[in-house]
Image: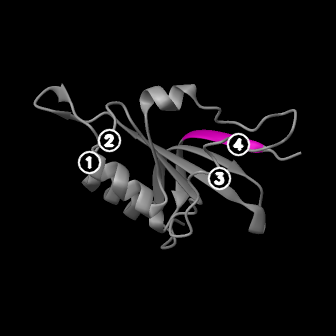
């Protein structure tokens, strides 16, 4: 039975020893079985109008999590992503989803079979993050 901890606004320890905040974390296991799914969200606006997340934001979040214990990174945007941002996220192994997609997903493990959620562990795993 794997225990999962979901934490809002979690401070993660950077490899330099500094604490860095992640919007949401989903953690399980310990030692070599430790998994940390970090979720970052944005609702960008430009000139008062909703604007899709950009390549720059994807790069910023990748850089932020590169030295954190994040094993999978999920980015959520209230107004979606530019095509370039989607492409960049895919190349970096980051799951980029809209808010409407995030609402529909099963985020926690199934208590009946113990399998992890579709977002957390298989679809967005990246050896380059964490």
Q: Are marks 3 and 2 in contact (CB under 8 Å)?
A: no
Majority SS type along the magenta span: strand
Q: Secondary structure at mark 2?
A: loop
Which mark identifies residue 81? 2
Q: Secondary structure at mark 4?
A: strand
Q: CA distance from mark 3 to mark 2?
A: 21 Å
Quadrant that contains the N terminus: top right
Identify the mark nearer the N-term, 3 or 2: 2
Name the front one of labels 1 and 4. 1
Q: CA distance from mark 1 to mark 4?
A: 30 Å
Residue 113 lies left or right of residue 16; in this view the side is right
Does 32 appear above or below 24?
A: below
Where residue 75 appears, as percent x and y from the top left, is: 44, 45
> Magenta residues?
4-8
Q: Are marks 1 and 4 in contact (CB under 8 Å)?
A: no
Q: Is residue 127 magenta?
A: no
Residue drawn at the location 54% of the way across and 56% of the way down? 12
Q: Are marks 1 and 2 in contact (CB under 8 Å)?
A: yes
Q: Residues within 10 Å of mark 2 (few under 14, many from 20)?
A: many
Q: Residues within 10 Å of mark 4 (few under 14, many from 20)?
A: few
Does 129 appear above or below 25?
A: below
Residue placed under numbered mark 3 in the picture: 122
Residue drawn at the location 76% of the way across and 68% of the way down? 32
Residue placed under numbered mark 4 in the picture: 5
Which mark identifies residue 54? 1
Q: Are marks 2 and 4 in contact (CB under 8 Å)?
A: no
Residue drawn at the location 44% of the way across and 62% of the way down? 92
Identify the mark nearer the N-term, 3 or 1: 1
Residue drawn at the location 26% of the way across and 55% of the way down? 56
Q: CA distance from mark 1 to mark 2?
A: 6 Å
């Amino acid at each position: 039975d794997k225990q999962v901890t979901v934490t809002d606004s979690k401070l993660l320890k950077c490899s330099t020893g500094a604490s860095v905040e992640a919007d949401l974390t989903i953690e399980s296991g310990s030692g070599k079985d430790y998994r940390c799914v970090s979720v970052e969200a944005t609702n960008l606006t430009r000139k008062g109008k909703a604007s899709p997340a950009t390549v720059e934001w994807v790069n910023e979040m990748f850089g932020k999590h590169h030295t954190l214990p994040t094993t999978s990174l999920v980015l959520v945007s209230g107004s979606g992503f530019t095509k370039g941002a989607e492409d960049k996220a895919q190349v970096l192994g980051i799951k980029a989803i809209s808010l409407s997609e995030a609402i529909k997903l099963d985020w926690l493990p199934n208590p009946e079979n113990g399998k992890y959620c579709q977002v957390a562990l298989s679809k967005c795993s990246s050896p380059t993050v964490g």
